[in-house]
Amino acid sequence: MTQPLLAVPATPPEGLKRETPESPAQVKPPPNVPRLSSEVLELLLSRGDAMLAIGDIASARRLYERAASAGDARGATGVGKTFDPRFLAQIGARGIQPDSAAAAAWYRKAAEGGDRTAVARLQQLGQ
């Protein structure tokens, strides 16, 4: 029997919980990327949240990017957070370079897909 390499809590700590809109926001995925089921998207987002909770920003970014590439606006917001100087400072992230321009670009993409939290984060960045 194989044991998991890392057990990560299913729900992130209070300060790192993902904001969820009333209905899942979707951005238009590239035509050659297959659509993912809502279950897989939720798994990617939850796992991204869990990686943020333990401070693994690079892994969180990859998971969120996968969700975003499948058209999920919440994934794009997640990627934006991994670049956002305010968010990174809030969670006490170390060893990762913030990038306001990249955060704003991802937040814009998420906002275009209907994720209202991305609009608020854009405003916090002064965009």
Image: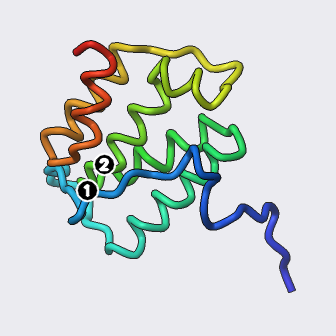
- The quadrant the C terminus occupies is top left
Measured as percent of width and height from the top left, residue 32 is found at 20, 54
Q: Which residue is mark 1?
A: 33
- Local secondary structure at mark 1: loop
Q: Residue at x 38, y 65 (%)?
A: 41
Q: Residues within 10 Å of mark 1 (few under 14, many from 20)?
A: few
Q: Residues within 10 Å of mark 2 (few under 14, many from 20)?
A: many
Q: Earlier in the sequence, mark 1 or mark 2?
A: 1
Q: Are marks 1 and 2 in contact (CB under 8 Å)?
A: yes
Where is 92 relative to 58, above or below? above
Q: Amino acid at mark 2?
A: Ser
- Local secondary structure at mark 2: helix
Q: Return the mark for residue 69.
A: 2
Q: Residue at x 14, y 50 (%)?
A: 28
77 vs 3, left or right, is: left
Q: CA gap, disc 1 to disc 2? A: 7 Å
Measured as percent of width and height from the top left, residue 24 is found at 24, 63
Q: Residue at x 70, y 19 (%)?
A: 95
